[in-house]
Image (spheres, rainbow, N blue to C red):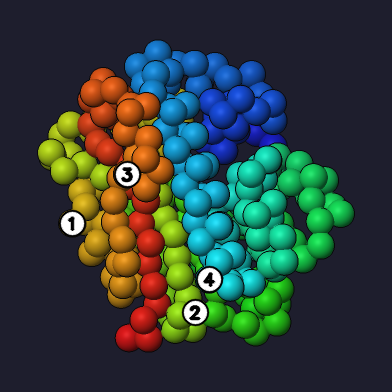
Amino acid sequence: MSVDEARPNISRIYDYVLGGHNNFEVDRQAAERILQVFPAYPRWAKLNRWFLQLVAEQWKQQGYTHILDLGSGIPTQGHLHSILTDAQILYTDNDPIAVAYARELLNKVPNVNFEQIDAREPDAILSHADQFFTGERKVAIGCIGIAYLIDDIKLGHLVQMLHNWSAPGTVMAMTIPASNTGLDDTSDIVSIFKRQNVEIFMRSEEQIRSITNPWRVVEFKPLTEWLNTTHLMQESDYMSVGSDFYGILFEHSGT
């Protein structure tokens, strides 16, 4: 397993801001520099995790038993397998530390697999999905907290490949920041992450809808509305990032 301990990793930065311990000093230093100018980061990260849990409950009620999760990070308490206890779940992530820890953590959890694959490599992801799900393609797909780390061309290719591969009735959940006031307002947050060797891509709602076509948008609204947590956020939390964070539900309608 090859791990670059000299370079911060977004998965481990995310783990740190959520209060986790699976990170290196370089990740903690990068996170602290981000927090100096983006103090709301932990709150947004928690909203992200809560939305994942909300979606998992919905999928359980809807009877989905095959779950493909992209950019899973470290599957700590409250992740998909703790809610969808009867489902087959394929987790994926490109960070070897997350994968190694996850495999140890999930060693005795039935029907769960964790593969080291980058979300920008859909061919490899779908090959593993076909093997793990033994050909079942009506699935639920998690794309939580990773779309803003993928450029437009690769994100468009990923969602198109997922749509081409999956069967009608498949659903997908995504979280993503979106600016409705102009992308110039997001330049500061992009620069902050770039200085920590993390490239992020900010988009408008219109751009997101275009990139994710042909998936049918079922619902597109801020995470705070999904979770009834508007009261937890302050105006400065939005100003510091120049956008709001959205949860989107998609459906493969068969077209």
Using residue 204 as the reference point, say whether residue 91 is left or right of it.
right
For disc 2, the marked residue is 166
Q: Residue at x 57, y 38 (%)?
A: 11
Say which element carries label 3. helix
Query: Where does label 3 land, which residue?
Result: 225
Q: CA distance from mark 2 to mark 4?
A: 17 Å
Residue at 40 percent of width and 43 percent of height: 227
Q: Nearer the viewer, mark 3 or mark 2?
A: 3
User: Whole-percent x and y of residue 66?
Assistant: 63, 71
Q: Report helix, strand or loop for mark 4.
A: helix
Mark 3 residue crowding within 10 angstroms, few (<14) / some (14–19) / many (20+):
few
Badge nearest the viewer, 1 or 4: 4
Q: Amino acid at mark 3?
A: Glu
- On the image, the x and y values in percent for residue 36 come to 40, 13
Which residue was labeled with disc 4? 62
Q: Amino acid at mark 4?
A: Gln
Q: Earlier in the sequence, mark 1 or mark 4?
A: 4
The kind of residue tagged 1 is Glu
Report if the CB atoms under discs 1 and 2 are less than 8 Å apart. Answer: no
As shown in the figure, which amino acid type bears the numbered disc 2? Ser
| Label 1 crowd (10 A; few <14 / some 14-19 / many >=20) | few
Q: Label 3 vs label 2: CA separation?
A: 29 Å
Which one is nearer the viewer's eye here, 10 or 143?
A: 143
- Of tags 2 and 4, the one toward the viewer is 4
| Tag of residue 206 | 1
- Residue 254 seen in this snapshot: yes
Residue 109, percent from left and from top:
81, 56
